Image (cartoon, rainbow, N blue to C red):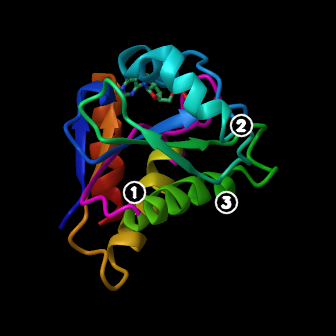
Amino acid sequence: MPMSIIQGDITTMRVDAIVNAANPQLKQGGGVCGAIFRTAGASRLQRACDALAPVPVGKAVITDGFGLPARYIIHTPGPVWRGGTHGEAQQLASCYQSSLELAAAHGCASVAFPLISAGIYGFPAGEAIRIALEQIEVFLAQPGHGTMDVSLVLFDAATHRLALRVHDDLR
Ligand code: ADP
């Protein structure tokens, strides 16, 4: 199944799992993480997260989706951009790999990602998109994973347009 590149609010996605651009402490924070906590129910999600924290950058853990339409939330701490010479690209790629493997292990048929690290953590959007699309494609090409429905959900119109351009350039 080909991946989808869509514009929207990830908290509204009716999928098996949405991915949270988390911090290693799995605290609510701002950005997409803040929105996910608010919609899921902040205190019950925080209790579930506190039992799993800390999580290393590039790894992933899973909780219930609580008040979200999604059944699960996969929490993956992305790298903070420090100029690109500190292994940020590899760490970001690992976020997508870890999250997709965890989704598959929990029997998820549909997963939606935000653009991890590209907000408060400062990763350049074009490069973050390229890594996201490449890692999703690599995962879907593996035996047994080709039927998973994976979406990249961009919050604003400009980043969505950029994602479509990066996707075309990768063809
Ligand atoms: P990070 O700390 O990993 O950089 P952010 O939450 O600051 O995470 O930003 C990651 C991306 O998520 C940004 O591109 C931001 O515009 C986007 N974003 C923010 N809110 C939402 C939302 N409700 N749905 C989808 N994407 C969102």
In space, the residues marked 2 and 3 are separated at their CA atoms by 17 Å
In space, the residues marked 1 and 3 are separated at their CA atoms by 14 Å
Which residue position is annotated with label 1? 133
Ranked by sequence position, the earlier of labels 2 and 1 is 2
Q: Are marks 1 and 3 in contact (CB under 8 Å)?
A: no
Which residue position is annotated with label 2? 24
Considering the numbered disc 2 on the image, is that residue within a helix, a strand or a loop? loop
Q: Looking at the image, which residue is at 60% across and 33% down? A: 49
Q: Position of residue 146 (x, y in %)?
A: 25, 75
Q: Is mark 3 within 8 Å of ligand 1?
A: no
Which residue position is annotated with label 3? 90
Q: Looking at the image, which residue is at 45% across and 53% down? A: 132
Label 2 environment density (alpha carbons within 10 Å; few <14, some 14–19, many ≥20)? some
Relative to 137, is 52 on the left or the right? right
Ranked by sequence position, the earlier of labels 1 and 3 is 3
* 30 inside magenta stretch: no
